[in-house]
Amino acid sequence: MARFASKLEGIETLYTFNDLVLLPGKSYVEPREIDLSTYAARGLRINLPFISSPMDTVTGSELAISLAREGGLGILHRNCSVDEQVEMARRVKRAESRIIRDVVVVTPDTTVGEAYRIMEEKNIHGLPVVEDGDRLVGIVTWRDIRYSDRGLRVSSVMTPRERLVTASEEVSLEEAKQLMHEHRVEKLPIVDGEGRLRGLITFRDISLKGRYPMASRDEDGRLLVGAAVSPFDLERAKRLDRYVDLIVTDVAHFHNENVIRAAAKMSREISARFVVGNLGTREAVLEVLSRIERVDGLRMGMGSGSICTTSVVTRVAAPTLYATIQAADALDELGLHGEIPVLADGGVRNTGDIALALAAGASAVIMGNVFAGTRESPGRLIAIQGKYYKEYYGMGSARARAKRAGLDRYSKPSKDIDEGVEGWVPYRGSVSDVVGELRAGLQAAMGYVGASRITEMWEKARFAYIPPQGSLEIKPHDIFIPG
Ligand code: XMP
């Protein structure tokens, strides 16, 4: 066979979300009973397999908070300064917790004006007052300062130590609630035997816990959150490390010698879970796993994203469904499938696509477009002819590249070409509404397959190929739908 003609011999067919359906299977469960809990990274459990993309029109702290409360997880974008990204992570961690560890404090000689500013800026209503770094001497609340002279010192308006209600680390939620109720206070400082501040329990946090029973939380009851970094930006990763549960590399082509080397170093210097990507092939996954000591998850898919022009520009692609299967099989070979989660990233539009991704071996999906349309995404909202839309653009688009701070995913210094587009997506309402629809749709899909949990999707779901003409038949057809 001629040298180049042979390249066409036995070439692979790449199936995408559009090409496949799942065959029905016998079911023993009702959709509402189906368990959707899964892992976002090794050992990091979440209650729903929905993760939001690290893009500046998708995941800021507001969306990350709402999504984690519903049971999913947000990955904070990095199209901002390190300080801004750290602040987003801290906001998520402060949103609720059993014990707040990262307590914002003031000293006795802080002015009332300054305390007021801190409370407004951080959206908190009480500040423990400390001396020598962490020795608790009082607490100052919104009520204490609201009508006080801004020039006064906090020491003259605070509740002093001797009148404070405090508790030790061992206090249970019930006891804390009881104490706060008895003494009519909303904040309970946690102190050690030497009177040093170890944390803070707030009434608001305790009451929120009951409100979001599905929330994805860490051991301290705080919401889970991830953050994206460039594999070359070790400083950013280190700064974020203590505030986030997982660090996700954000690079269009992870299977690159320099990237792998940089990521290997990063994996040794951070303690948060480490998810790498994006990757597209089995060889890439095997090499990455053999060269990076600690990989806690794989972000799979290249070229399927709804805003992505990589494949238009380069004709290179590893569509998400294909890439997911490649990773799942590579992990299977090593006996690691199920231990290291595969995250299917890009091109996921609806619950049918999510079901296909899970059937292909994914533990969860990463979605940009779907979440960009929610109320909590940071993008602008506009009305066009009576309909609402939210702004959405690719991280490799001219728009994002112009804004980009620091080291880059797609752009200069390594590339001179845009690999993403910008536009508008329909407004979809709150994250809670969108997640509710996704959950119900996915449970229905799994019900048809006969899978009562995601690991059963891996075993039971069977694919079938549907030719393009066939795809038309399995959508609504021969009916006029106004809209
Ligand atoms: P969806 O389809 O959910 O895809 O909107 C989101 C995912 O697309 C990736 N991404 C990009 N890919 N050029 C690309 O080739 C870009 O400008 C771009 N921006 C984001 C990313 O993996 C995201 O999660």
Image (cartoon, rainbow, N blue to C red):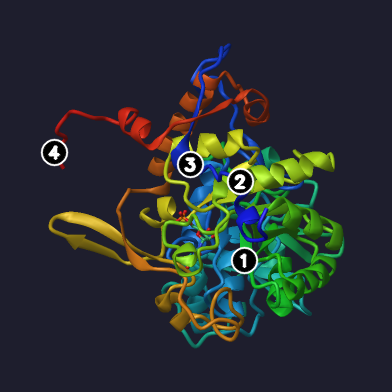
Residue 103 coordinates in the image, percent (x, y): 66, 66
**Left or right, residue 291 beside residue 457:** right
Marked residue nearer the N-terminal end (2 or 4): 2
**Left or right, residue 2 beside residue 32:** right
Q: Residue at x 68, y 53 (%)?
A: 1
Which residue carries the number 2 mark?
Answer: 12
- As measured in the structure, the alpha-carbon distance from the residue carrying label 3 to the one carrying label 1 is 26 Å
71 lies above or below 201: above
Using the rendered view, name the quadrant where residue 72 is placed: top right
Which residue carries the number 1 mark?
Answer: 228
In depth, the one of 276 and 150 nearer the eye is: 276
Residue 151 coordinates in the image, percent (x, y): 49, 88
Disc 3, disc 1: CB below 8 Å?
no
139 lies above or below 461: below
Which residue carries the number 3 mark?
Answer: 17
Does the image show residue 479? yes
Marked residue nearer the N-terminal end (1 or 2): 2
Q: Residue at x 75, y 54 (%)?
A: 283
Q: Is disc 4 placed on a helix, strand or loop?
A: loop
Q: Is disc 2 placed on a helix, strand or loop?
A: loop
In depth, the one of 321 and 55 nearer the eye is: 321
The C terminus: image quadrant: top left
Disc 2, disc 4: CB below 8 Å?
no
Q: Is disc 3 placed on a helix, strand or loop?
A: helix
Identity, as a three-letter code, of the amino acid under mark 3: Phe
Identity, as a three-letter code, of the amino acid under mark 4: Pro
Q: Residue at x 63, y 31 (%)?
A: 454
Disc 4, disc 3: CB below 8 Å?
no
419 lies above or below 327: below
- As measured in the structure, the alpha-carbon distance from the residue carrying label 2 to the one carrying label 3 is 16 Å
Marked residue nearer the N-terminal end (3 or 1): 3
